[in-house]
Image: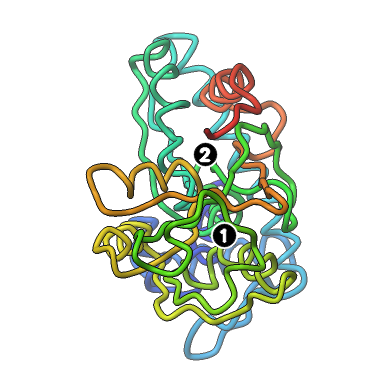
Amino acid sequence: MIDKLEFLLALSRTQHFGRAAEACGVTQPTLSAGVQALEAQLGVRLVNRGSRFIGFTDEGARVLGWARQIVAAQRGMYDDLHTLRHGLSGTVRIGVIPTALAMVPALTTPFLARHPGVHFTVSALSSLDILHMLENLEIEAGLTYLENEPLGRVRAIPLFRERYRLLTAAHLPLGDRASVSWSELSGLDLCLLTRDMQNRRILDRLLARDGAGHPPVLESNSIVTLLAHVRTGQWASILPETLAELAGADGPVRSIPIIGPEVTQTIGLVVPSHDPATPLCNALVAEASKRRIEDSR
């Protein structure tokens, strides 16, 4: 049954029969036959289908929830047995919101020093994608905001507080200031992350609250793109303090604290709430717990 439950998980991730079959390493007829066999075994229809995948039935959505738990438990069992025989090893796939990428080494470096047999794969993802991929067992952990939007069924360990800076050149508006308030940002031509990123949604709320809801002149889902524009000395942006330091290195950019009031957001590690957790997950949580709530400055 496990292989058929894996088919359901792949369908949930891809929303497409062909891509799900490719992800599982089988042909599309094999995947379709497996899903139909599972439906016959359970006595319920799981998938709405026509000429293409339409979605899951109510029963299918319930089975999908159980499938995630069962498949996660099986993988955890294999990982646990492997760790007993060979020590901690394997790959940890971690999704990170773009604004927290600069903080990842504070977690991965000491972890790898203790567990040299482990390999990390780090992907920049939106907060919503992190939660979706955790649920579908596509990643083992995420670094994301903990306070603003629902996290669902995850275990969360606070790591640090994100503080904000105005990045601008000295000759641009407000560029000669030692500090600025949120309300003073009204009318600035800013480059910001796109609205699918939670950082942008946080900034939109903060700017609108103080009457500074001027639309950005440039949007990107890439922090590198924002930093590249800021470093020309012709653009301004609002970025976390850690990224502001990167932008200002050997360049014309000033990093100006935004106060009145100073705003912080908690970023932390999130992992699935499965019990028992995998050895890799337990080790990652233990490492994160040693570093919880460190300021990002």
Closer to us: 109 or 49: 109
111 relative to 177, above or below:
above
Judged from the image, the secondary structure of the residue bearing numbered disc 2 is: loop
Please provide percent x and percent y for residue 127.
57, 56
Q: Is residue 281 left or right of residue 62?
A: left
> How many neighbours does mark 1 have within 10 angstroms: few (below 14), some (14-19), or many (20 or more)?
many
Percent across and percent down for residue 18 are 38, 73
Residue at 69 percent across and 37 percent down: it is 156
141 relative position to 20: left or right: right
Q: Is residue 240 above or below residue 269?
A: below
Q: Secondary structure at mark 1?
A: helix
Q: Position of residue 152 (x, y in %)?
A: 74, 52
Closer to the observer: label 2 or label 1?
A: 1
> Looking at the image, how many numbered discs can be counted on the residues?
2
Q: Which residue is mark 1?
A: 199
Would residue 3 be seen by someone viewing this image from the given angle? no
The crowd level at tag 2 (other Cα within 10 Å; few <14, some 14-19, many 20+) is many
Q: Amino acid at mark 2?
A: Glu
Image-based side of 248 in relation to 131, left or right: left
Residue 256's place in the image compared with 186, above or below, is above
Q: Quadrant of residue 250?
A: top left
